[in-house]
Image: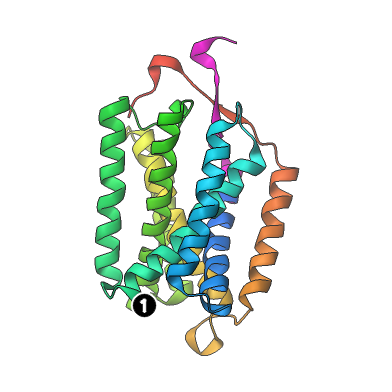
Amino acid sequence: MNEDSAATKVPAVTLTFWIIKILATTLGETGGDTLSMTMNVGYLASTGVFLAALALLVLLQVAARKFHPFLYWATIIASTTAGTTMADFADRSLGIGYAGGSVLLFLCVAATLLLWRWTQGSVSVETVRTAKVEAFYWATITFSQTLGTALGDWTADAGFGYAGGAAFFSAALAVVALLYFRSRLSHTLLFWAAFILTRPLGATVGDFFDKPLKQGGLDVSRPLATAIIAGAIVLCVLIFPQRAGRHPGGSANA
């Protein structure tokens, strides 16, 4: 295989990728809340559980020699459930609120991307082939999942409601997609913008499923919603083709 066209260890960014990503972020919300709230484990202890699972899965992902769909998406789900409980812990237990949590987490995402860009020359997902780049990739993803949770909760509580929040972030994603196809803005920048925005979309959709009717939700139990969404993800991975992205050699840029 030509080194310049070698496969990466992450999936190609296709419509299927975004469908599964949104499902995974929704599962992160219902799954995280199931452990921390429904099972009453608490935000801090739940964060410890999910971070431990995330660390193990990232190690397996780094050790893998090629892209494995189920391993990759399990790692994404671990990051999004950890993101849910970390955001809730920061916003509620630490008392910094949704605005403070969102600003702090945005700075974490920005700092990680800047350090990645400075040390590796690109933040494109097409460069995810080495352990060092994978470390930056998963750190950025975890911070972005946590940021997205805080943004979703902030928007819902600011008066949009859960359905309104989902509509807002869906519209924002549509704008990003339009810019991707119709503008000359960096596709790498737009990818990370879309990646972050899918998380609050999933957070608001997850809350819409499990919150009480009087709070604007559908009052579906969190464990049931989690099981349904997990089943949908498994079906998507089995039915739709999952292929690794390609490394374009020196052409990748941020």
Q: Observer-nearest residue: 175 or 197? A: 197
Q: Observer-nearest residue: 200 or 97? A: 97
Q: Classify 204 as above or below 198.
A: below
Q: Among all residues in the image, which is located at the extreme bottom?
A: 214
Q: Residue at x 43, y 47 (%)?
A: 141
**On the rendered structure, is 230 left or right of 203?**
right
Magenta part of the chain: 1-19
Quadrant housing the N terminus: top right
Q: Residue at x 36, y 65 (%)?
A: 150
Q: Among all residues in the image, which is located at the extreme top?
A: 2
- 109 is within the stretch colored magenta: no
Q: Residue at x 37, y 47 (%)?
A: 193
**On the rendered structure, is 41 left or right of 116?**
right
Q: How is the image coloured?
A: rainbow
Q: Residue 41's x, y, as percent?
A: 52, 75
Number of numbered labels in the structure image: 1
Which quarter of the picture shows residue 121? top left
Q: Classify 198 as above or below 227.
A: above
Q: Residue 217's x, y, as percent?
A: 54, 80
At label 1, the amino acid type is Asp
Which quarter of the picture shows residue 151? bottom left
Q: Residue at x 32, y 76 (%)?
A: 158
Q: Is residue 178 visible?
A: no
Q: Secondary structure at mark 1?
A: helix
Give the residue at mark 1. Answer: 157
Q: Is residue 91 visible?
A: yes
Q: 10 Å neighbourhood of mark 1: few (<14), some, or many (≥20)? A: few
Q: Residue 152's x, y, as percent?
A: 40, 66
**On the rendered structure, is 179 left or right of 101?**
right
